[in-house]
Amino acid sequence: MATNWSDYIQIDRTWVDKQLKNHFSDISDKLTIRLYTVKVSGTTIIPNGLADELYFMLPDYVYSPDKIEELGKRKAYLTANKFFGRKDPQTDGKYGELLLFALVESVLGCKMVGHKIASLSNFRDQVKGGDGLFLGNYALSDGRLTPAYLIGESKIMGNYSGALTDAFKSIDRFHNASSDEFLTSEFIVAKGNLVFNNEDDLDELYDRLTPSTNKFKEQVLVHPVLIMYNSDLVKNCETAGGLTPSDLEELLFNAISKTKEKIVKSINNKLVTKPNLKTIFLDFFLIPFNDVDKFRNLMYYLIHAEHYTK
C-alpha cells in the first residue's frame, strides 16, 4: 500500500489561515497561481506573526522527528540555528526556502523528505539546486490526486519581474540540455540529507527518488515556486489604510482583484518563452509585501537571538 506522506507532516498546517490572506488561486491545467498577502495587524502590515510561525518550525525544517526527540525541543531550536549561519540577511536565500517548506507542507499537503541545508560545508555558501524535495499526492486541476515529487524554488526579492525571471531560469536548469545530470545530482543530495526517519517507508522513499523504478515513473514532477516581493500596491493600500483592520483588508482585496489578470498574464508570458516547462507542473505562491527586507531582518534576529524559544 502506498504511503500517505501527508500523515508525516509535523507542522501546524493551520498557520496559513492565521498569518496569510488568500486573494485568489488560478488553476489551469499544469499551471497554478496562488496569491497571498500577510494579514493586517491593526492598520499596518508587519512580518512579526509570519516570522514567529516560521521560527517555531525551525526544528521540523532541519531535523527528522527522531532527531528532535533525541536533542530535546529547546536544544533542537538552538542547534537548528547554526544551519542558517550569520550570512547577510539581504542576500541569504534560506529564509525563502523555509517559507516555501511551510507553504508546500501546509497548502499542498506534501511532505519534505530532503533538503540541501545540511550539506553546507561553509554556512556562508549557497548550494545550487532545488529549495527542498517533497513527496505526496498532488491535486490536479480536475480534482484527481496523483503521486508526485516536488522540487521547490524560492525567491525573496525587491522586484517582482526580476524574481519571476530568476525563478524561471532556475527551474529551467532541470529541463534544458544538461537537465539529466542536474536532476540526478538533486536526488543524490536529497538522499544524503533526508529529514525523514520512518523505516517502514524508507524503501518507498528511495524508490520514488530512483528514476529507474516504476514508483518513480508513476509520479508527476511539480515545481512549487515562492516569489515574495516588494509591492507599491501593498504600500499604497497601507498608507490609505482606513480606520480599522477590516478597512485595510478590503482595500487590499479590491486592489489586488484588479491586478489578477495582469499577474496571471505575466507568468503565462514567461512560460511561452520556456516551452519545455509546459510538460511539468508549476505551482506559484506569490506574496506581495511592503518591504521584504523587514521580513528578512526579523528572521535573522529571531534565529540568532538564542534566548527566543517557545
Image (spheres, rainbow, N blue to C red):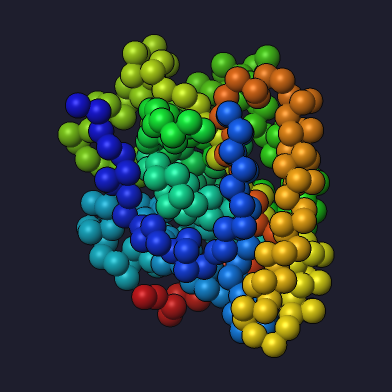
Q: Between residues 216 and 271, which one lies in front from this camera angle? A: 271
Point out residue 65 in the picture as x, y percentages from the top left corner.
Answer: 27, 52
Please, is residue 280 above or below residue 161 in the view?
A: above
Residue located farthest toward the bottom when viewing the structure as drawn:
243
Please, is residue 16 above or below residue 34 in the view?
A: below
Point out residue 46 in the picture as x, y percentages from the top left corner.
Answer: 63, 75
Q: State left or right for residue 29 relative to residue 148.
A: right
Q: How many marks?
A: 0
Point out residue 173 in the picture as x, y percentages from the top left corner.
Answer: 66, 26
Q: State left or right for residue 40 relative to residue 237.
A: left
Q: Can residue 126 be seen in the rendering of this structure?
A: no
Residue visible at 58% across and 28% down?
Answer: 29
Residue visible at 72% across and 20% down?
Answer: 275
Residue 213 image-quadrant placement: top left
Residue visible at 36% across and 61% down?
Answer: 12
Q: State left or right for residue 60 relative to residue 249.
A: left
Point out residue 262 in the picture as x, y percentages from the top left corner.
Answer: 79, 46
Residue visible at 62% across and 81% down?
Answer: 245
Please, is residue 95 above or below residue 242 in the view?
A: above
Q: Can residue 295 be seen in the rendering of this structure?
A: yes
Residue 244 image-quadrant placement: bottom right
Image quarter in which the C terminus is found: bottom left
